[in-house]
Amino acid sequence: AHFPYGELSNTDIIKAVVQAVVKIFSCGTPRILTVACNTASVAALDEIREFAPCPVVGTVPAVKSAASIDDGGAIGVLATAGTVESAYLNRLVSAFAPGRRIVKVAAGDIVRFVEERWLDEGDIGAIPVMERALALMKEEKVGSVVIGCTHFLHVIDPIQRLLGPEVKLVDSRDGVGRRILALLGEPETKDTADDDSSFGDFWVTLDGISDKRYRRFSEAHRLDWAGLLP
């Protein structure tokens, strides 16, 4: 309903995220809530945790991990405008990468591509969309790039090819995954290769012309289409 949320004001992002979470809790209390979006996390984690009846895990740019890489280069942060311009990102930089040169690039056009065209065009179609943002990173001679948007993980391979093998890509998947499993008290390794069951339900916050596209996403990730969130 609020896409592309990375281009909304901070106030509107908080309102949209809180509304969605309230709807989720109206369906029941989950064991854990994961905010699988950097933009939503840096804007609204505090607000969600104030009323959430379960543990909440956010997804924030992995600046700490990037700062631990001693490559002598600048740290790039590739994200949405909402994340790049956030006070939360500035706090992460101050806490974990003081004195390091940070190159922030907003790339909302990549988000739009993944949402609207990636299923049809794949990595080949992604390359011209990403060239501008990644050219800025290369011009600044970054040694590592923080992938600060979960949409970009769909096109991580062409991002690496365009930046070159010498640039280290850093994201928060492993850290978020370990935190979720720790809070749930579950092992970090689980063999699902031969399990063809569904991983859960896929809900949307607005039905309409985008349903066909999101149905395809749900099928690609072995989720059952549930339609409009009540």
Image (cartoon, rainbow, N blue to C red):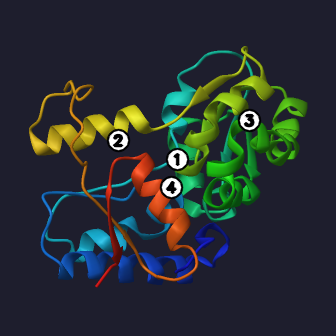
Task: Name the residue beneath numbered marker 3.
Answer: 101
Task: Name the residue beneath numbered marker 1.
Answer: 92
Give the crowd class for mark 3: few <14, some 14-19, many >=20 residues within 10 Å: some
Q: Quadrant of residue 224?
A: bottom left
Mark toward the start of the polypeptide (2 vs 3): 3
Amino acid carrying label 3: it is Arg
Q: Quadrant of residue 136?
A: top right
Cα separation between marks 3 and 1: 13 Å
Cβ atoms under marks 2 and 3 closer than 8 Å? no
- Report the front residue among 156 and 198: 198
Q: Position of residue 118 (x, y in %)?
A: 66, 50
Q: Nearer the viewer, mark 4 or mark 3?
A: 4
Q: Nearer the viewer, mark 2 or mark 3?
A: 2
Q: Secondary structure at mark 4?
A: helix
Cβ atoms under marks 2 and 4 closer than 8 Å? no
Q: Position of residue 176 (x, y in %)?
A: 35, 41
Mark toward the start of the polypeptide (2 vs 1): 1
Cα separation between marks 1 and 4: 13 Å
